[in-house]
Amino acid sequence: MTDRITRRDVLKFGTTAAASVALRPLIERSMETRAMEPDHQLASITENMDTPAASDSDICFLSARRMADLIRQKRLSAREVMRAHLRQIDRVNSKVNAIVTLVPADQLMAQALAADESTLRGNLKGPLHGLPVGVKDLHPTRGIRTTFGSPLHKNDIPNFDCLVVEREKNAGAIVIGKTNVPEWGLGSQTFNPVFGPTLNPYDLTKTCGGSTGGGSVALACGMVPLADGSDMGGSLRNPPNFCNVVGLRTSPGRVPNPPSTLGWFTLGVAGPVARSVTDCAFFLSALAGFDRRSPISIDQSGSQFSHSLAGRNFKGVRVAMFRDMDLPWEPEVKNAVQAQHKVFQSLGCIVEEAEPDLSDANECFVAWRHWSIEASFGDILEANSSKLNEYVRWHVEEGRKLTGPYLSRVESKRTALYQRMREFMEKYEFFILPVNQVLPFDVKTHYPVEIAGVKMENY
């Protein structure tokens, strides 16, 4: 194994389905394009204009930041960008089922035209001006169907935008459609009774993860340059990891959460997904920032995330590399991450095997997850029990068993956990560990019931 994790390493679990083989060139184009220098990217677009498929691929796999720069510089129009992505969706989406509600093409092209007219007037709305964005089907969108993957909402069309979508639009993005989720966003496997499963583009027999599965797959396949997501227990990390893109679980309050009714709750957050770390930070610069509707909103501008780390000297920076966290791991996962030890050393970092004491973390997480889902779905369960899936019903039932004294003890343990983690991170600037304990599993399996011989209690 080489010192760096490569796309080949990610693919080593195999791409066996014939349809997946057909998709692979579309995905691999992403790596080729990202490796180009900016001028080569533009030259490639120009040289291939006579071949629509090649031109579309070159546009669709540009970095989001570069795409935005070219639009701002009037070297690429928002209409060209939108047209290329619509054709890519037409070619690819039926194979993976990532985008489940697509805004009509004539409406999208009209919005792209309006963006181009604004560009010509020198009136760019913001950093995402003219870029298509995929919105997770848990985020309400004005005038666009939002189902939560549930039969209860399969035809719902909200009359408002949630804050994440507000900020995307205010930054100039064009919502291209909604991306698939597990029912109510629960689980690390993207499937639901409304739209069915979303498939991993590297192997159509495998899961793409959850719950931001549709957005991660759409990015991997070049159907959108940016996609938003949300995370309670891994949903901005698990699917991007399985699909070889980048997701960031933001700190609570970094991206405020209106219209959530649990304004003080810190487990659920929104955040960005992109094809690179640079694009993830670029997207976060538009999403982050204070909003008085959220009581935990952080009063800092998102513009701080638009700055590059290029040129930073990492000599002497202390990095902790995980050992095993007292958890079972599939060996390929553990070995791939631990092999990166030399990469950080080559940057000048001081790398040590070390990990914090996270005992009680699972108990705290499970308790507050049960509590939050009971708070969100308890009333719905009373009226529509048969229309809620087994996971929702289980969470609500468990949430109703929680007592005040027990939650008090859990919160004390959670506070102690915070203090241990704070002390650990005062010694190390970075802590390196895998996103998932397993490789992508069978798409027909709801969740791994066993990892390295250890049985799992639940998802």
Image (cartoon, rainbow, N blue to C red):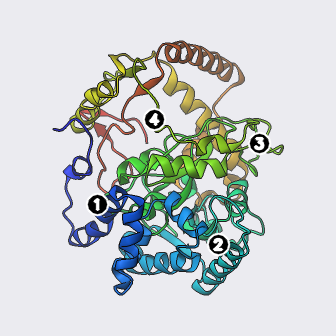
**Marks 3 and 2: which is nearer the front?**
3
Residue at 76 percent of width and 36 percent of height: 299
Q: Residues within 10 Å of mark 4 (few under 14, many from 20)?
A: few
Q: Which of 159 and 24 is in front in this view?
A: 24
Please, what is the three-letter code of the amino acid marked with disc 1? Tyr
Q: Which amino acid, mark 4?
A: Gly
Instruction: Tell me how far mark 3 sits from mark 4, CA to CA.
Output: 29 Å
Which is more N-terminal, label 4 or label 3?
3
Regarding mark 3 in the picture, which secondary structure is present there? loop
Report x, y in % for residue 25: 26, 68
Distance CA(mark 3)–CA(mark 1): 38 Å
| Contact between labelled residues 2 and 4, with CB atoms less than 8 Å apart | no
Real-space Cα separation, disc 2 to disc 1, in angstroms: 28 Å
Tell me whether the residue at label 2 lies in contact with that at label 1, contact meaning CB atoms closer than 8 angstroms. no
Residue with the mark numbered 1: 202
Question: Which numbered marker is on residue 145?
Answer: 2
Residue 362 makes an appearance in the image: yes
Secondary-structure class at tag 1:
loop
Above or below, 391 relative to 20: above
* Label located before the other in sequence (1 or 4): 1
Q: Residues within 10 Å of mark 3 (few under 14, many from 20)?
A: some
The residue mark sitting in front, 2 or 1, is 1
Q: Label 3 is placed on what type of residue?
A: Phe
The residue wearing badge 4 is 311
Q: Can you give x and y, in whole percent of width and height, for residue 453 in the image?
A: 23, 33
As measured in the structure, the alpha-carbon distance from the residue carrying label 1 to the one carrying label 4 is 34 Å
Amino acid type shown at disc 2? Arg
**On the image, numbered disc 3 is attached to which residue?**
290
The image quadrant where one finds the C terminus is top left
Q: Seen in the image, is 375 located left or right of residue 242?
A: right
